Image (cartoon, rainbow, N blue to C red):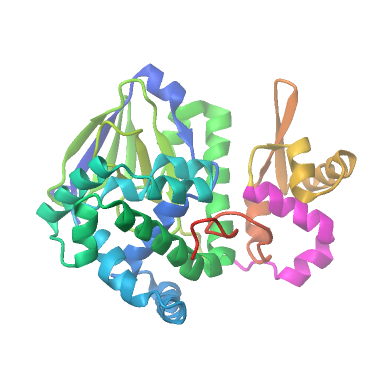
Amino acid sequence: MSPRSRGVLRIVFTSEDLALTRMATRTDLLWEMLGSLHRLQARDGGQTMAGWRRQARARLTEAGLLASVRSLLLPLAPRGPYFPDFLTPIEAQLGDEQALQALADTPGTRMRAEMELLRRTAGLPSTELADLARGDRQAIKRLGRLVAGYCAAVLTPHRPQAEPALAHERTLLQRHLVTGGAEQLLAHLSPAMRWRPPVLEVDYPTGLDRELPLRGRGLTVIPSYFCRGNPVALVDPALPPVLAYPIRRPGQRRAAGGEALTALLGRTRAHILNCIVQAPGCSTGELAHRARVSPSTASEHVHVLREANLIASARQVNLVLHYPTELGADLLAGWPVRGAGSFGGRRNTLAP
């Protein structure tokens, strides 16, 4: 797409907005769900995504969800100029259960308004969509259960590939935010975004030109594994401003295998490195809780990891916060992800 033909989203900052700009600290389940629905409708992403699509269809068939996904989720999230904002609530930043609950609790009035916009741009080809368009509470609850089942079937199995890549991107963002503030973070986003103070220019599809004044609300930047192409913002300017964007795809790197990494670091130390990658910015006390070790043990392993340049630590008031380095995140890429976390890693009350 040439610079003349592409659309542009202009996000306008004030000094207050810069102070309130933040990055997502966890994987956003519903932005990943949305991006994955777009990948199911596309033929992009090379062999990695082609293999994922085959596995996703097989798992959805096995779970008895394929027909519902085709009739409800895919037309609800078309690869076009519009999909409803209620699919990606800001509550997802609090955790997967909160994300799914917020989706199931979407008010009928909001559901009707956003479904009307979808009808104008893409149509409502199924009975299920028509029920949502009326704001039917039972239809909204069915949607919540379907989304939970979809995430468990097709996102959870892909976590070992997606989470290290997302953690690596968050580490880069956190480093820029800590060392240079929001302006440095904005200046080092993907090539599809350009920081020209006080405006962040974002590549958008052809014919879609928008301006989004933040007006003192700040911006939440959300790296996404399944998002490809253009970054995405919400349509409703009254909602908390967010910008989901495709993570940088690193070159082919030889990652350490799981058993080799355990042999190199020891199982406990490898697990502690994994905890830091999954929760960058955690304190020593939080790390001990996550790893289920004593604070003194956590502190000892943190010292060794820091000396090996696998993590970096920064003092904030009376806490020492720990972040994975690029080397640490790359090294962990071959290690299996364990424990509850993003991508529906823990079953929730809405799952069928």
Judge left or right: residue 16 versus residue 130.
Answer: right
Residue beneath the point at 57% across and 60% down: 347
Judge left or right: residue 270 versus residue 329.
Answer: right
Q: In the rendered structure, which segment of residues is drawn in magenta?
A: 252-278
Residue 158 placement (x, y as % from top left): 53, 68
Residue 228 falls in which quadrant of the image? bottom left
Judge left or right: residue 201 versus residue 61.
Answer: left
Q: Taking the image as drawn, is residue 226 in sight?
A: no
Q: Taking the image as drawn, is residue 165 in sight?
A: yes
Return the residue found at the far left. Answer: 120
Q: Is residue 316 magenta?
A: no
Q: Main secondary structure of the magenta part?
A: helix
Q: Is residue 268 above or below residue 309?
A: below
Quadrant the N terminus occupies: bottom left
Which residue occupies the foreground of this view, 107 or 76? 107
Q: Is residue 175 above or below residue 216?
A: below
Residue beneath the point at 22% across and 61% down: 129
Which residue occupies the foreground of this view, 245 or 348? 348
Residue 79 placement (x, y as % from top left): 24, 61
Judge left or right: residue 113 versus residue 70.
Answer: left
Residue 92 placement (x, y as % from top left): 46, 45
Residue beneath the point at 67% across and 59% down: 332
Residue 66 falls in which quadrant of the image? bottom left
Residue beneath the point at 63% across and 58% down: 330
